[in-house]
Image (cartoon, grey):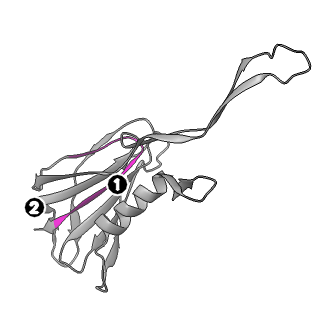
Amino acid sequence: MFTINKDYQVQQYVSQYFASQLINLDWIKAGNGEHRVFSAKSDINDGAGRALLTAYALDRPDGDWSLLIVNRDQLAPHQFRINFHDDSAHSPKSFTGQVSISTFGSEQYKWHPATTEFMAHSASAAEQPVFSNTKGHADPDGPAVHTTKDASPETSYEIPAASIMVVRGKLK
């Protein structure tokens, strides 16, 4: 969840920390209430028929519905609409009114791995060459972006490349 120094002090949070916050603070509702998870699917596929967007629908105890969406496409953002199908209602439902949108992806977090670079030969042949060492670090390093949007059945959403998104609101 974070990087530490030799004294075990937190130096920087890593992507798993921010993704966990998105799931535990935005997708689900904290507390003892019952959450019901439903299957969800996307019709956005790659050329081989593999789903590029995966989704997980959640009926929260506070009356909101929450959709966790993962864009597995590392290179491209995708536009989509959200519809809920309820067999008993015989009509599709969608988010209406104000929805909360939380997004975490490569625009919020990019890891730069540790590097070792050869800098110069030492003055004496018996001495080791000089190297420059860096530790890995993230830049930018979070947090998730939180916005709101007025939603209707015609609302289109965009999920950035290589990101996760939570859309939460009321259905009608």
x and y percentages locating residue 146 in the rendered image: 24, 53
Give the class, few, some or many, for how many residues have Cα within 10 Å of label 2's Cα (few <14, many ≥20): some
As for residue 163 lying within the magenta part, the answer is yes
Residue appearing at x 30%, y 82% in the figure? 31
Q: Which residues are magenta?
A: 157-169
Q: Amino acid at mark 2?
A: Thr
Instruction: Point out residue 120 in the picture as x, y percentages from the top left corner.
Output: 74, 16
Q: How many marks overall? A: 2
Q: Residue at x 87, y 15 (%)?
A: 124
Q: CA distance from mark 1 to mark 2?
A: 20 Å
- Determine the secondary structure under disc 1: loop
The residue depicted at 22 percent of the width and 69 percent of the height is 65
Point out the image quarter for the C terminus.
bottom left
Residue beneath disc 2: 96
Residue 3 sits above or below residue 127 on the image:
below
Q: Which numbered disc flags the more N-terminal residue, 1 or 2?
A: 1
Residue at the outermost top position: 123
Residue located beneath label 1 in the image: 42
